[in-house]
């Protein structure tokens, strides 16, 4: 049923043109482009949390920014609660923006040092035309309390606070307009372990209290496992596997997912370690390999991998994988 | 160790005792501001100058006292006997020299050999740390290499003189997880080949669980608990260590609610008089707020700085050390 669709991203692409030449003196001679996000398709149900993981440069943050219209998309569609986000303009877009917000990684860089905490959290209300000052103040105070900050902080400046408290301020700012979709881009990776748990717990509490849907972008797989219902992995601009959390962590399919999971050091010295490590680096997105972008590092690469791009296929139960290994397996069964 | 500050002297590291045996890896874990990096810098005689001072204590390396050595004596030891790799390979490498020249320079600073010989040593070492076509890469400038490659260059530079002790301060924190795994296995292999000792400084409990023989947990400039790795994870004793382990999300097993440690690390300018962890501790007693606990040895090689063990189950009447 179409009215059940909360967020659906289809064939989303974001290509950054690369200008060549010294000091970019000839900007018109655009030759190549970085395909930061290349044909990404996924959907999130209302109230669900999708974890989006991958290594640096895989396009996970760009995906988040493009779907919130913080960066223009090259092509594709983003369908959010009954409207096509990428085609909205002007007043319609401004209205729609109340429905989705972003939480950023760096609580030091994302808060204006010249604004008080009250002003930072209030800003979205002003921008979206809540004219009455007492009403704004009331809503700000309410929100600060919800994220566990004392209302006496209203007139203080962000630099007076620790990383964890700043992240609480960032969360209060994101939630003040009561959005339904939150894109959280590495919200806890700048924090110390003991504080990280406080913020993860707060995000989960806010999720049930305000009925939020999260796109949770992170590189830390254990954090993603803790907070997500489903997980998607990106590699060089494409989703290579997506599935329910348990399927993903207990029965991973893509060789890259296997390698990622095996690479995470675990706080358990008795665990048997599998020395399954990838050789080589992530290739440059300027010049990605032909065929499956993972094949130069893949321990199971075969002949089709270097010529043909594998499509995402449903392996049952909403578990999708883009890998030739499973293409042949499936055709054999059929 | 002390630093002057607006509110008088601060003590980023206070009463720290560590011992590393030949061939052993000691994991030094702690959150930001715990003093773990300052401890490792002090070992190298690299405290920020002119203000950083070792106020008291001793650092013995193979029986030789390092505290109070003249700078040129320290320079002879640094790199040759003890070397260090840092978290960020981009800021630790010189951008205007090729990586081969930088490694060769380290060799020539300690050994009287020709430029050609030094270059050969550099290229050999680059090959050893798994850099493909090392002959070619030796002529590359740091910015041309990826993060993982730069960290390999740092390791090559640190190990080219075959030091007996390697201090690795968050060696993989800036790297992606698959590259982190490569670097850690590389360090493990090199450690075995060279028979060196390693001081692994990190905030990541997973890293020390997999790579250290024993672990010291630091908080507010003190070591709160120290134990062999399996012992520490099997029987974590200090409330802070337990809190840390309970607050990390896990990769397997049932989902449990994360038990966050309430509050935050006290600033060094106003540390509480008693136990530095008391204000966040759920086992706090009156005594904890007044008097700092000494170190109790609860088991062989397992020591805890906590009053719970004063008359606790494991207390065997000795004050360790």
Image: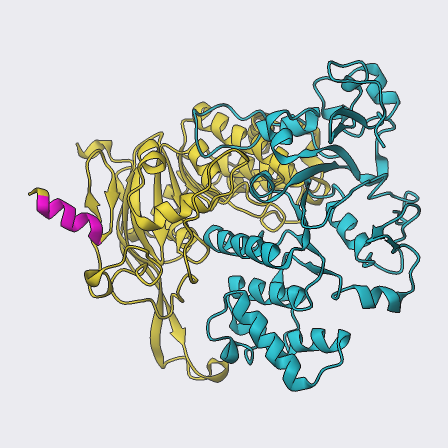
Answer whether residue B257 is visible to the viewer in this image.
yes
> Could you say where residue B52 lies in the image, as x and y percent from the top left?
87, 54
- Magenta residues (range): A324-332
- Colour that chain B carries in the picture: cyan
Q: Is residue B76 magenta?
A: no
- Colour that chain A carries in the picture: yellow
Position of the C terminus of chain A, as image quadrant, is top left
Pick the residue in front: A260 or A160: A260
Q: How is this picture coloured?
A: by chain
> Could you say where residue A75 lies in the image, as x and y percent from the top left?
27, 58
Q: In this figure, what is the number of numbered marks?
A: 0
The residue located at (24%, 65%) in the rendering is: A306
The residue located at (15%, 46%) in the rendering is: A329
The residue located at (78%, 64%) in the rendering is: B78
Pick the residue in front: B81 or B68: B81
Answer whether residue B261 is visible to the viewer in this image.
no
Answer left or right for B98 relative to A256.
Answer: right
Asked if residue A144 is positioned above or below residue A76 in the image, the reply reads: above
Position of the N terminus of chain A, as image quadrant, is top left
Answer left or right for B218 relative to A203.
Answer: right
The residue located at (36%, 42%) in the rendering is: A96
Pick the residue in front: B274 or A86: B274
> Could you say where residue A226 lies in the image, as x and y percent from the top left?
45, 32
Answer left or right for B170 relative to A156.
Answer: left
**On the image, which quarter does residue A81 sit in?**
top left
> Could you say where residue A121 lies in the image, as x and y percent from the top left?
58, 38
Principal SS element in the magenta part? helix
């Amino acid at each position: 049923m179409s009215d059940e669709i909360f967020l659906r991203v289809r064939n989303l692409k974001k290509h950054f043109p690369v200008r060549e030449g010294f000091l970019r003196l000839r900007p018109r001679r655009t030759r190549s482009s970085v395909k930061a996000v290349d044909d990404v398709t996924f959907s999130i149900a209302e109230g669900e949390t999708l974890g989006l993981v991958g290594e640096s440069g895989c396009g996970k943050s760009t995906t988040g920014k493009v779907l919130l219209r913080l960066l223009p998309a090259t092509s594709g569609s983003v369908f959010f609660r009954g409207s096509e986000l990428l085609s909205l303009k002007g007043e319609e877009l401004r209205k729609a923006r109340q429905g989705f917000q972003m939480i950023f990684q760096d609580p030091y860089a994302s808060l204006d040092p010249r604004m008080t905490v009250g002003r930072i959290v209030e800003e979205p209300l002003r921008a979206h035309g809540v004219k009455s000052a007492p009403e704004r103040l009331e809503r700000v105070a309410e929100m600060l309390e919800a994220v566990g900050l004392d209302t006496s902080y209203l007139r203080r400046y962000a630099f007076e606070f620790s990383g964890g408290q700043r992240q609480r301020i960032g969360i209060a700012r994101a939630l003040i307009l009561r959005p339904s979709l939150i894109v959280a881009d590495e919200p806890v990776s700048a924090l110390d372990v003991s504080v990280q748990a406080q913020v993860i717990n707060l995000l989960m509490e806010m999720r049930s209290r305000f009925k939020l849907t999260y796109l949770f972008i992170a590189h830390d797989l254990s954090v993603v496992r803790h907070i997500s219902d489903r997980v998607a992995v990106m590699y060089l601009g494409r989703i290579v596997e997506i599935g329910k959390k348990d399927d993903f962590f207990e029965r991973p399919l893509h060789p890259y997912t296997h390698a990622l999971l095996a690479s995470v050091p675990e706080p358990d010295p008795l665990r048997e370690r599998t020395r399954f490590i990838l050789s080589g680096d992530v290739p440059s997105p300027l010049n990605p390999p032909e065929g499956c972008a993972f094949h130069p590092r893949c321990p199971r690469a075969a002949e089709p991998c270097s010529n043909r791009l594998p499509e995402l296929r449903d392996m049952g139960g909403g578990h999708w994988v883009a890998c030739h290994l499973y293409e042949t397996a499936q055709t054999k069964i059929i | 160790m002390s630093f002057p500050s607006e509110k008088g002297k601060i003590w980023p590291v206070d009463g720290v005792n560590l011992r590393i045996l030949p061939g052993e890896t000691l994991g030094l874990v702690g959150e930001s501001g715990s003093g773990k990096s300052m401890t490792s810098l002090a070992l190298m005689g690299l405290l920020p100058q002119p203000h950083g001072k070792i106020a008291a204590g001793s650092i013995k390396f193979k029986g030789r006292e390092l505290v109070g050595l003249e700078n040129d004596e320290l320079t002879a030891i640094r790199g040759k006997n003890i070397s260090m790799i840092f978290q960020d390979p981009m800021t630790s490498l010189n951008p205007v020299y090729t990586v081969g020249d930088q490694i060769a320079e380290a060799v020539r600073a300690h050994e009287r050999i020709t430029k050609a010989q030094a270059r050969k040593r550099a290229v050999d070492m680059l090959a050893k740390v798994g850099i493909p076509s090392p002959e070619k890469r030796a002529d590359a400038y740091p910015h041309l290499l990826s993060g993982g490659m730069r960290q390999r260059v740092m390791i090559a530079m640190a190990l080219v003189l075959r030091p007996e002790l390697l201090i690795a301060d968050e060696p993989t924190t800036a790297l992606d997880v698959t590259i982190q795994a490569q670097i850690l296995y590389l360090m493990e292999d090199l450690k075995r080949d060279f028979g060196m000792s390693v001081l692994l400084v990190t905030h990541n409990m997973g890293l020390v669980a997999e790579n250290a023989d024993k672990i010291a947990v630091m908080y507010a400039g003190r070591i709160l608990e120290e134990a062999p790795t399996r012992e520490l994870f099997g029987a974590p004793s200090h409330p802070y260590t337990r809190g840390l382990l309970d607050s990390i999300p896990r990769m397997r097993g049932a989902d449990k609610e994360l038990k966050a440690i309430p509050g935050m690390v006290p600033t060094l300018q106003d540390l509480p008089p008693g136990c530095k962890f008391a204000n966040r501790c759920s086992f706090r007693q009156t005594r904890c707020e007044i008097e700092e606990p000494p170190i109790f040895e609860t088991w062989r090689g397992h020591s805890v700085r906590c009053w719970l063990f004063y008359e606790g189950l494991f207390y065997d009447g000795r004050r360790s050390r």
